[in-house]
């Protein structure tokens, strides 16, 4: 009788040990799955951050490309203005002591356009210098 009680006690203890071992295995698997989930979330966060950085620098590069393009357009417009004022000065030259023009139609306006033409020439050359610089040497781009 004592043998039967001991035997069944041993069987019950063994079953409890197996149940505890299985619950430990399940807890370990839950920990592994949780750890893998954390690693995957961390990797996704790093990928999102890298995409944000790439997008940010693409935006910055696009902005400065746009600014340089605007300078180029402005340079072209000043070149056109400079050409137009050159034509105007050719049509209505400034009278001087060597070649006086007795009936100049717009003597004051003509001299003002000549001054403005000089200013546009200076501005045009400044924009040409700015457009010829590499992007990393333009003060606003560095």
Image (spheres, grey):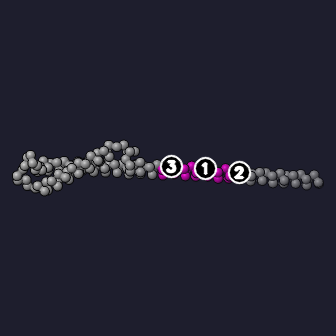
The residue depicted at 48 percent of the width and 50 percent of the height is 53
Q: Secondary structure at mark 2?
A: helix
Magenta-tinted stretch: 30-53
Q: Position of residue 34 (x, y in %)?
A: 64, 53
Crowding at label 1, few (<14), some or many (≥20) Cα neighbours within 10 Å? few
User: Which tag, 1 or 3, sits closer to the chain's start?
Assistant: 1
Please state if 10 lies on the left or on the right of 62 as rendered.
right
Crowding at label 2, few (<14), some or many (≥20) Cα neighbours within 10 Å? few
Please state if 25 lies on the left or on the right of 45 as rendered.
right
Q: Which residue is mark 2?
A: 28
Q: Position of residue 138 (x, y in %)?
A: 37, 47
Q: Which residue is mark 3?
A: 50
**Residue 7 shows in the view:** yes
Marks 2 and 1 sit apart, C-alpha to C-alpha, by 16 Å
The residue depicted at 93 percent of the width and 52 percent of the height is 3
Q: Is residue 53 or residue 132 the one in the foreground?
A: 132
Please give the label number shown on residue 39.
1
Q: Is residue 19 or residue 7 the one in the foreground?
A: 19
The residue depicted at 12 percent of the width and 50 percent of the height is 94
């Amino acid at each position: 009788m004592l043998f039967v009680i001991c035997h069944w006690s041993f069987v019950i203890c063994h079953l409890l040990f197996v149940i505890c071992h299985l619950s430990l295995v399940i807890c370990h698997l839950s920990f592994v799955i949780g750890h893998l989930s954390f690693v995957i979330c961390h990797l996704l966060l790093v990928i999102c951050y890298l995409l944000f950085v790439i997008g940010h620098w693409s935006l910055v590069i696009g902005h400065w490309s746009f600014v340089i393009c605007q300078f180029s357009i402005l340079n072209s417009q000043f070149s056109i203005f400079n050409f137009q004022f050159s034509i105007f000065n050719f049509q209505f030259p400034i009278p001087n002591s060597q070649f006086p023009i007795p009936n100049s139609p717009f003597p004051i306006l003509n001299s003002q356009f000549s001054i403005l033409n000089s200013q546009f020439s200076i501005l045009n050359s400044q924009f040409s210098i700015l457009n010829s610089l590499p992007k990393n040497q333009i003060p606003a781009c560095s």
